[in-house]
Image (cartoon, grey):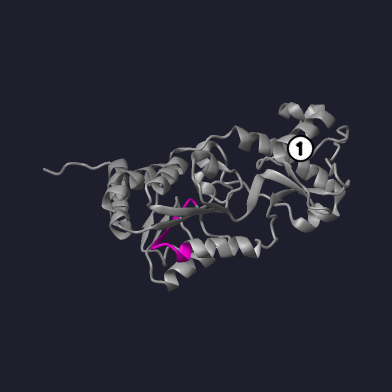
Amino acid sequence: MIVPVSIAQESESELTTQIGRAIDALAGCRLAVLTGAGISTDSGIPDYRGEGAPKRTPMTAQMFLGDEDARRRYWVGSHLGWQAFSAAEPNRGHQALADLEHDGVVTGVVTQNVDGLHLRAGSARVVELHGTMRRVFCTDCYQVFDRRDIGARVERDNPWITVPDSVPLGPDGDVAPRAEFDFLIPDCTVCGGLLKPDVVFFGEFIPAEKFREAEQLVRASDALVVAGSSLVVNSGIRLVERARRRRIPVVVVNRGATKADQRATVKIDGGTSEVLARLADALPALR
């Protein structure tokens, strides 16, 4: 008698097999971890490259620095986006990596995200390749400001922005202010210069010292785990290539295809929260 197997059962069986292969490949290893936007989707932060993600026109450094109207639009959308980031909480994936670091399995996390959720989950060694939304700096005198203080100034000078329903939100959280909104862009309270969130804009180079720190973390580890990144951004695939040249295991966890699927020791097509939690349950006992 043939017992029918549902698609869901087949998928779960395949996922369990993939995780088992990853556990075998990573057993006894010290892991460097590279994370992308996919690890934060379970915290309510959208992944703009995932399946079904809306098309977007990212802000470039040239536009931000050279066009006051573009800068005004960015600050409105960035402030509302920062409100969402600051309200988000770490999920099981973030917590699993923090637990694995505490257990001596993970040596550190390199992240392409700017949401700060790894630090809030308790990870101690975090390399934020693309910067962080927690800080703002002056492009003239380089004074650094806490984003919460800048946010308070934005809301004080632009009280309408505290009511998101009063402005048309785009699909990626950007905003085109209506003409009647005379948005006051925050400036540096030290020198009056131009303020910029401490994030790497589209087209900007990642600071060399940050990438060297990420390379050192991979060099000091026995395996690399990529979680929630399609590896479209060049910095991520470069780290995978560093690991491949050292002939250490590379495990990729991501829903959908990535640029490293053919180079990975194991590719797990699944959600990062579930997979990382299961790895965190298994790997410490195998040290």
- Along the line of sight, the residue nearer the viewer: 176 or 7: 176
Q: Residue drawn 48% across and 69% down?
A: 241
- The answer to whether 283 is drawn above or below residue 219 in the figure is above
Residue 91 in picture, x, y percent from top left: 47, 38
SS for dot 1: helix
Q: Residue drawn 86% across and 37% down?
A: 184
Judge from the rendering whether residue 213 lies leftward or rightward of residue 185; answer left or right: left
Q: Quadrant of residue 74?
A: top right
Residue 30 in picture, x, y percent from top left: 38, 58
Residue 121 in picture, x, y percent from top left: 50, 39
Q: The magenta stretch spans which residues?
A: 218-228
Residue 166 in picture, x, y percent from top left: 76, 27
Can see residue 45? yes
Judge from the rendering whether residue 90 lies leftward or rightward of residue 7; answer left or right: right
Q: Give the residue number, with chain letter if any, for mark 1.
A: 150
Q: How many marks?
A: 1
- Along the line of sight, the residue nearer the viewer: 149 or 74: 149
Judge from the rendering whether residue 154 lies leftward or rightward of residue 252; answer left or right: right
Label 1 sits on what residue type? Ile
Q: Residue drawn 49% across and 61% down?
A: 217
Q: Quadrant of the N terminus?
A: top left
Can see residue 234? no
Q: Residues within 10 Å of mark 1 (few under 14, many from 20)?
A: some
Q: Residue drawn 88% across and 32% down?
A: 180
Residue that extends furthest to the bottom in the rendered view of this protein: 245
Q: Quadrant of the C terminus?
A: bottom left
Magenta stretch: includes residue 224: yes
